[in-house]
Image (cartoon, rainbow, N blue to C red):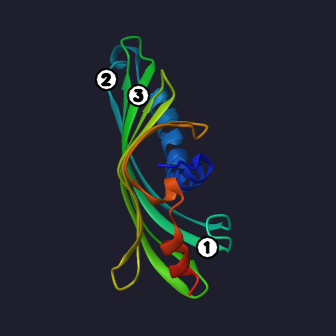
Amino acid sequence: MRIHSSRFMRTMSRRVVPCAAALGCALTLSAVSCGAALAAAPTFQRFSGSFSEVDADTCGFPITNDETFTVDVQFFYDQHGNLNHSIAHIKLRGTDSAKGTTLIDDADITHTFDFTTGINGDLGLQSQVRLPNGGVVAVDAGRVLSLDDGTVLFAAGRHDFLSGDLQAYCAALNG
């Protein structure tokens, strides 16, 4: 599979960054509320929200992405109370719209982050884009391990956004 790490970063940033901002708030809150005696106990947070953005790069014309999300995250600590890793379940529901066409865009991701190595892990349905009548035009599903800079360490599964195989997606939005 040919990998477009910049496209991957845009796609995953579109999905994870708004959720990560909420996770950052959770991390700050859990660090403040976690006492020394309970430092090794995991902490839990739940967030939800929405965002809208315009992607002008993927197809060469503006695509408006409107998403709502929920995030359930668990933070794990080492025996000294230092943050070790996190596991987040992220659900996104939304639309991708351009030139009068609106596609349905969903994701159910288990996102892990290892604070000791800096490795991100995404497992599950990172994106499934469907026509209003139900036909699928793009899928990212499987497992991806990456660094924060977008370097893909491992990928398995079908990854249309990651591989750049987006002809059906762009054609559907182009009318």
Q: Is residue 89 left or right of residue 99?
A: left
Please determine whether, in this image, residue 80 is positioned above or below residue 32. above
Q: Which residue is mark 2?
A: 41
Residue drawn at x 40%, y 33% is 86
Residue 38 position in % (x across, y down): 34, 19
Which quadrant is the C terminus positioned in? bottom right
Q: Earlier in the sequence, mark 1 or mark 3?
A: 1
Front residue (pair 31, 105): 105
Q: Residues within 10 Å of mark 3 (few under 14, many from 20)?
A: many
Residue 11 position in % (x across, y down): 54, 56
Q: Which residue is mark 3?
A: 85
Residue drawn at x 42%, y 16% is 81
Q: Earlier in the sequence, mark 3 or mark 2?
A: 2
Please determine whether, in this image, residue 101 is positioned above or below residue 79. below
Q: Which residue is mark 1?
A: 63
Q: Earlier in the sequence, mark 2 or mark 1?
A: 2
Looking at the rendered structure, the secondary structure element under dot 1 is: strand
Q: Amino acid at mark 2?
A: Ala
